Image (cartoon, rainbow, N blue to C red):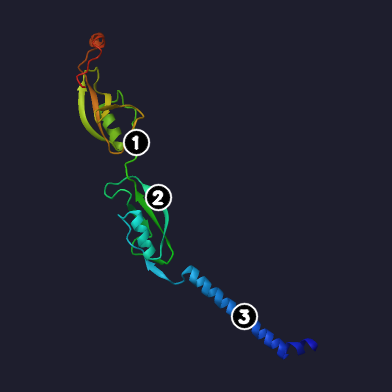
Amino acid sequence: MGLLKFIFSKTFLIQLGLAIIVSIVILCGFYKWMESTTNHDEFTEVPNLKGKKLEITKGLLDERELTLGNIEYKDYNPKFPKEAIVEQSPAAGANVKVGRKIYVTVNKSEYRLVRIPGLKDKTKRQATSTLKAIGFKIGKITYKPHFAKDAVIDLKHKGTKINKDDKLPYTSVIDLVLGDGKLNYSDKPKAESDNNVDVVK
């Protein structure tokens, strides 16, 4: 009976009411805090970042209360300015929550370097197809005395001889020096004694 009397007493009811009020205040405060930190139900439109430099991009994102996420770099594409954004996620025009990270891919400032394969003594067809397949362009083709017709003797870039495992930028122009097939085996000693003087300099 004493416990029931205390539960229904004025003192207990006042304390219970105060506890309920305090709990409600704490819960409301916590909800408001969560709402302010998570930008609950606040959305913004993602701007178009393609073709823009990173320093400009950061300002555009700040205006929309967005942040820049991880940055990836892609092989140079001449269709875009150097070090400009070529891809973004989410896409331009998407509605996202304020504070969302926007991930971008940036165009490198130069073509990547590609290793020169071993092509000496390969045929013209083999050499040209291999070089084109890895991103090079075929330039001038010249011939010099040699036993095998169209066999690769040398590769050159801007007049300089290049060797296996050298590296050149993607899309570089490579010149081929090929054999003319007019040198007979009986001519070899004479050619060697003449220090193999080439018709191609």
Which quadrant is the C terminus positioned in?
Answer: top left
The numbered mark at residue 72 is 2
Amino acid marked by disc 3: Val
The count of marks equals: 3
Where's residue 59, x and y in %? Answer: 36, 60
In the image, what residue occupies the spot 80% across and 88% down?
2
How packed mark 2 is, by other alpha carbons closer than 10 Å (few <14, some 14-19, many 20 or more), is: few
Name which quarter of the figure residue 13 lies in: bottom right
Task: Say which quadrant the N terminus sits in.
Answer: bottom right
Tell me which label, 1 or 2, sits earlier in the chain.
2
Residues at discs 3 and 1 in contact (Cβ within 8 Å): no
Quarter of the image holding residue 66? bottom left
As shown in the figure, which amino acid type bears the numbered disc 2? Glu
Q: Nearer the viewer, residue 66 or 129?
A: 66
Q: Earlier in the sequence, mark 3 or mark 2?
A: 3
Residue with the mark numbered 1 = 114
Residue at (63, 82) in percent of width and height = 20
Name the side, left or right, on which 182 lies relative to 126. left
Label 3 – label 2 distance at C-alpha? 50 Å
Please tell me whether mark 3 or mark 1 is closer to you in this view.
3
Q: Mark 1 and mark 2: span between their CA atoms?
A: 20 Å
Mark 3 lies on a secondary structure that is helix
Q: Position of residue 39 (x, y in %)?
A: 46, 70
* Residue under pointer 3: 22
Residue furthest to the right: 1
Q: Is residue 166 above or below residue 9?
A: above
Helix, strand or loop under label 1: strand
Check the image and report above or below for 155 versus 25.
above
